[in-house]
């Protein structure tokens, strides 16, 4: 029987996950984690892991649902995760 072993994350992947978490926290603002998770169709625990940077490689559909619930485009969220640590773009939700 074969066991799938996940490759260790690279430092870049970990940093990108941390930037994603920071961007989501910033955009969430005063909205509760439970409310955002419900609006995105995620469990609060999944959102907690993303915000903490402990889920650095969420699925495309998870990211798309979060972007929609936060009122930002996928491009904006991707830019926040790809930028270097000292050049993260300022994000703001529309509406």
Image: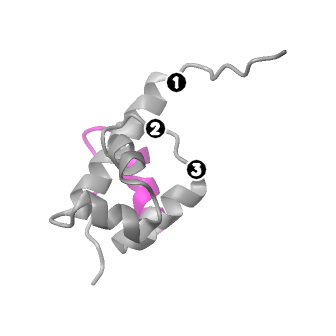
Residue 59, disc: 3
Nearest the viewer among 19 and 83 is: 19
Residue 41 image offset from top left, x and y in percent: 47, 65
Give the Cα distance between marks 1 and 3: 15 Å
> Contact, CB < 8 Å: mark 1 with mark 3?
no
Q: What secondary structure is found at the residue carrying circle 1?
A: loop
Residue at 62% across, 20% down: 7
Nearest the viewer among 45 and 26 is: 45
Q: Is residue 23 left or right of residue 62?
A: left
Give the Cα distance between marks 1 and 2: 9 Å
Residue at 22% across, 57% down: 26
Residue at 50% across, 23% down: 10
Residue at 42% across, 54% down: 43
> Contact, CB < 8 Å: mark 1 with mark 2?
yes
Q: Say above or below: 6 vs 29.
A: above
- Within the image, what quadrant is residue 67 found in? bottom left
Nearest the viewer among 11 and 34 is: 34
Residue 9, disc: 1
- Within the image, what quadrant is residue 42 found in? bottom left
Residue 87 image offset from top left, x and y in percent: 28, 46
Colouring chosen for the image of the structure: one colour
Residue 85 image offset from top left, x and y in percent: 29, 38
Q: Say above or below: 95 vs 2.
A: below
State which tag comes first along the sequence, 1 or 2. 1
Residue 56, disc: 2
Number of residues whose C-alpha sits closer than 10 Å to that of mark 3, classed few (under 14), some (14–19) or many (20 or more): few
Residue 20 visible in image: no
| 82 magenta-colored | yes
Q: Residue furthest top?
A: 1
Q: Is residue 4 left or right of residue 89?
A: right
Tell me where the magenta segment starts and ends, as one range. Answer: 74-89
Q: Quadrant of the N terminus?
A: top right
């Amino acid at each position: 029987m074969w066991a799938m072993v996940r490759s260790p994350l690279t430092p870049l992947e970990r940093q990108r996950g941390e930037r994603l978490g920071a961007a989501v926290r910033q955009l969430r603002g005063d909205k509760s984690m439970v409310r955002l998770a419900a609006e995105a169709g995620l469990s609060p625990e999944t959102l907690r892991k993303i915000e903490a940077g402990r889920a650095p490689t969420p699925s495309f559909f998870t990211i798309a649902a979060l972007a929609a619930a936060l009122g930002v485009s996928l491009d904006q969220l991707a830019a926040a995760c790809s930028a270097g640590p000292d050049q993260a773009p300022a994000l703001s939700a529309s509406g």
